[in-house]
Image: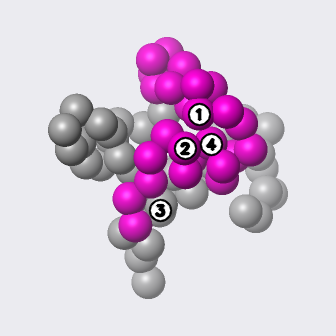
Amino acid sequence: MTDRKLWSYKDIAAHIRVQPDTVRSYRKHGHLPSPDHVESGKPYWYADTIRAWVASRPGNRGRRD
């Protein structure tokens, strides 16, 4: 089953326990996947996209959030 809920910067930040500005910085520097959806200029990602990104990040091997 896939999780198609859209997450904002705030949702991603809560998931990885950082501030939303940190997530914005990740995107600015190309460390975040491309948004799955953009609405009114605001990017959103599917929860599954972010979970896959978190699993593939260096230093997060074995993490099960």
Find the distance from the CA under tag 1 to the CA under tag 3: 19 Å
Amino acid residing under circle 4: Ala
Find the distance from the CA under tag 4 to the CA under tag 3: 15 Å
The quarter of the displayed image where residue 4 is located? bottom left
Q: 10 Å neighbourhood of mark 1: few (<14), some, or many (≥20)?
A: some
| Residue 21 screen position, x and y as percent | 58, 25
Q: Nearer the viewer, mark 4 or mark 3?
A: 4
Amino acid residing under circle 3: Asp
Between 58 and 18, the one nearer to me in the picture: 18
Q: Are marks 1 and 4 in contact (CB under 8 Å)?
A: yes
Instruction: Say whether disc 1 or disc 4 marks the residue closer to the N-terminus.
Output: 4
Q: 10 Å neighbourhood of mark 3: few (<14), some, or many (≥20)?
A: some
The circle on residue 48 is: 3
Find the distance from the CA under tag 2 to the CA under tag 1: 5 Å
Q: Secondary structure at mark 2?
A: helix
Residue tagged 1: 20
Residue tagged 2: 10
Q: Are marks 2 and 1 in contact (CB under 8 Å)?
A: yes
In this picture the colour scheme is: one colour
Q: Is residue 26 visible?
A: no
Q: Is residue 6 above or below residue 16?
A: below
Residue tagged 4: 13
Which secondary structure dominates the residues rendered in magenta? helix
Find the distance from the CA under tag 1 to the CA under tag 4: 5 Å
Q: Is residue 27 above or below residue 62?
A: above
Q: Is residue 40 left or right of residue 14?
A: left
Q: Secondary structure at mark 4?
A: helix
**Magenta-highlighted residues:** 5-31
Q: 10 Å neighbourhood of mark 4: few (<14), some, or many (≥20)?
A: some
Q: Is residue 46 above or below residue 39?
A: below
